[in-house]
Structures are given as structure tokens and as C-alpha cells.
Image (cartoon, grey):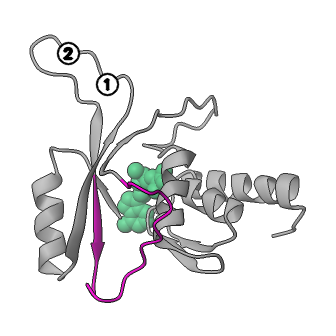
Amino acid sequence: MFFSGWTNLKDVLNALKEVKFIIINHLIWKYQFGVYTKRKFVTNHYHILFACKNKKKYNFNKIEHYPEDVWIINREYWTNKIKTPTKLPIEIVKKILLYSSDEGDIVLDPFICSGQAAIACKMLNRHFLGFEIVKEYYEFAKKRIKEFSLKYLNLCL
Ligand SMILES: C[S@@+](CC[C@H](N)C(=O)[O-])C[C@H]1O[C@@H](n2cnc3c(N)ncnc32)[C@H](O)[C@@H]1O
């Protein structure tokens, strides 16, 4: 799954084509409260591209009877001191994981930021791999994952 705002969408689509990803679905995530505007419409959606390398071999667990391609999910409010960039709501990450992976799978989030995908993986019994280029965010995610594990799973990382 690839997330993009509308301003970069054409570049993301071109990049995916270049590396031979096949787009299965183009979803819209609608969230509450975009930034107030005076002379244009308020943006309150993201694009989610469901893509794969092999059309005959990809995971799609039909967890809903009628899986629609517009998802209305609220953003989360965080009060943490470190200001990390865009965080996906845990609800959206869990939904993606449930559709596209199975228990015990390894999930890769190449841009892990606050560790949201890793936390969702822990909640849903998936393994995870992630990368983060900003040391401060990496430390934040590491601490968060460790605390989550200790609190809810009683595991030591
Ligand atoms: C929008 S956030 C990711 C949000 C996250 N995946 C989630 O589920 O909420 C993008 C993150 O990618 C990191 N990043 C950007 N370029 C990177 C790179 N080349 N390698 C690793 N991390 C990178 C940024 O520092 C930022 O924290």
C-alpha cells in the first residue's frame, strides 16, 4: 500500500509504473478537518494505492463483505512532546494489515516514523521491519515499541 497526497500523486504513480508495480485499487482515505482555506477547497483526503508485483499472487483477505474503496477514518490527536511527521491512525494501519497480511507474516514499513505500523503488527501478531532516517524519530519509535511490548504483551525486546 502506498500513501500519497494529491499534489505528489502523479509522481508516485509514475514511479510505481517505472518499477513495474501493478495497481489493483486506488482508494481514498477521507479524514476529518483539513486545513482552513479561503480561496480553494479544503483537502481532507489521501490517496492509497493498493499495488502488487504479481497479479496472480498477492494477499487479499476479504475481511469485510463489501470492501469499499473510500475509507472514512478520523485522524488521531497525539500529545507527545516530539513532533513526528504524518502519523497514520492505528485503525487504518490495522485495516491494511488485516487485508494484506496473515498472522506471523513479516511486514515492512520503510518509513516507520513514530512506529505506528510496528505497534499495529504487535497488536495483530505480525513481525515487522522498518527504517527511519531521523535519529530522534527512530529513538521515539524504539521507546514506544518497547513500552507497548512491556505493557501489553509482557515481552522484553
Ligand atoms: C510520513 S512519515 C511515515 C509515517 C508512518 N509510516 C506511519 O505509519 O505513520 C515518513 C517518515 O519517513 C522518514 N524517511 C524519509 N526518508 C527516509 C529514508 N530515505 N529512509 C528512512 N526513513 C526516511 C521520515 O523521517 C519520516 O519520519
Q: Mark 1 is on which residue type?
A: Gly
Q: Secondary structure at mark 2?
A: loop
Quick one: which residue is furthest to the right in this view?
154
Q: Which residues are magenta?
A: 48-67
**Residue 39 drawn in magenta:** no
Image quarter hosting the N terminus: bottom left
Q: Position of residue 83 (x, y in %)?
A: 53, 36
The residue labelled by disc 1 is 34
Q: CA distance from mark 2 to mark 1?
A: 9 Å
Question: Can you give x and y, in whole percent of width and height, for residue 146 in the image?
Answer: 77, 59
Tell me where residue 44 sits by quadrant: top left
In the rendered view of the protein, which quadrant contains the C terminus?
bottom right
- Give percent across and percent down for residue 133: 46, 62
Q: Quadrant of ligand 1?
A: bottom left
Mark identifier at residue 20: none
Q: Is residue 13 above or below residue 68?
A: below
Query: In this rendering, is residue 56 above or below 73?
Result: below
Query: For residue 115, what is the image quadrant?
Result: bottom right
State yes or no: discs 2 and 1 in contact (Cβ < 8 Å). Answer: yes
Q: Residue at x 30, y 21 (%)?
A: 35
Give the camera-side residue of 90 and 14: 90
Give the residue type at disc 2: Thr
Q: Residues within 10 Å of mark 2 (few under 14, many from 20)?
A: few
**Where is mark 2, residue-wise?**
37
